[in-house]
Amino acid sequence: MKTWKRILTAGVLLTTIVSLAGCNSTRGSSSSQKSNDKELVYISMPTEAEERWVKDGNELKNQIKDAGYDVDLTFAQDKVEQQNSDIENAINKGADIIVVASKDGSAVGPAVEKARDAGIKVIAYDRLILDTEAVDYYVTFQLEKTGVWEANYIIEKLGLDKGEKGPFNIELFTGSADDNNAKYFFKGAWELLQPYFEEGVLVSPSGKVTKDFTVDDWQDISIDSWKMEKAQSEMESRLAKYNGGSVSLDAVLSPYDGISKGVINAIEGQGMPWKVGSADWPYITGQDAMVTALSDILEGKQGETVWKDTRELATKVAEVCVEILDGKDVETTETMNNNVVDVPSILLDSKSVTKNGESDAKDTISVKDVVDSGYVTAKQVGLE
Ligand code: GAL
């Protein structure tokens, strides 16, 4: 750690100890100090309960370790307070860089501000940190593109692009209201789907979305913390409008495989007469290429998922960390505004996955392609 950073860190540490003493906490003790002089990258992931963050965290940890640096990896159990205390811990340990995939993009602001005051660089990982200047870089995937993939899958499957007029019944969901990504995913999808609502070709029997819905209303259909169980109970209540299945459901716009699974569970659990593999079963989208989603795609329960190869994200973030630690310039491709500053950003490409890669859209691949890339095994997804 550089001398100037030691001084800043000591200052912040002192402030932290003083403030913690007031609230009778034991955190901030000297035992959490860094034990050697290697630079430390501290990774704060939002939760261990979701497959991707565990994968992301470990991949990033290994890559940074291989580059010769110390790494700490923590998971915040989807709790704002836990993530803030993890970041405080990173400051106390004298971290040089903190990589944060935030649970709540705004609530994490004060914690990263303390980190910046201590001279620590802050990288927002996958999710943008909002409403603060204290974010140096943002690395993620093309956000709106996720929604574009999902909407185009539905448009193609229902033949809307070929002039089919339906009307088709669809239910739409967005991700967690505290995750900036969720809005962008929906924006990409809604801009393509809204004109069909306008024409009356798409309708939402639950009444949750009408033609007058706007991107800014996205939190009205959000699923807190992206939780499968919450999606399931929301879908169960929406299914009440389907009269035991006599009203058809043609498609579900889901922005994440966990939500898709909740939707599938609801349809199956409510005993709807729609049979997997038949024309009655809805086209359901998703995101993350989770193991369960890939097997559901093979079984015909889910139609599509958007695959963001998190190994690429980890590699890119590890590169950025090494560049920072080596005092080199970090090359970014664009900026993303976080309500306060334009954050230098790098946005990677995603792909769409269907069972056999069937779709007119370029960069649609098959489940087997994902397996062949080594992202998941054939056994995990039931391909062997
Ligand atoms: C988002 C992320 C998605 C998905 C979701 C739920 O922020 O971009 O890929 O993982 O969180 O964890």
Image (cartoon, rainbow, N blue to C red):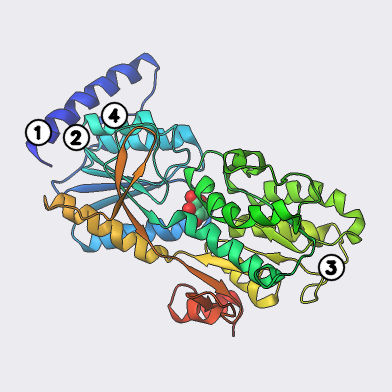
Q: Residue at x 47, y 74 (%)?
A: 363
Circle 1: is it few (<14), some (14-19), or many (20+) Cα within 10 Å? few
In the displayed structure, would residue 208 be above or below residue 309? Answer: above
84 or 92: nearer the eye?
84
The N terminus, quarter of image: top left
Mark 3 or 1, nearer chain start = 1
In the displayed structure, would residue 299 be above or below residue 226? Answer: below
x then y, percent, for residue 171: 73, 54
Residue that label 4 marks: 114
Label 2 residue near ligand 1, CB within 8 Å? no
Q: CA distance from mark 4 to mark 1?
A: 16 Å
For numbered disc 1, what is the local secondary structure?
helix
For numbered disc 3, what is the local secondary structure?
loop
Mark 2 or 1, nearer chain start = 1
Give amino acid for label 2: Gly
Q: Which mark is residue 97?
A: none
Circle 3: is it few (<14), some (14-19), or many (20+) Cα within 10 Å? some
For numbered disc 2, what is the local secondary structure?
loop
x then y, percent, for residue 34: 21, 41
Where is residue 114, by image quadrant? Answer: top left
Q: CA distance from mark 2 to mark 4?
A: 9 Å
Q: Residue at x 28, y 17 (%)?
A: 18
Residue that label 3 marks: 274
Q: CA distance from mark 3 to mark 4?
A: 53 Å
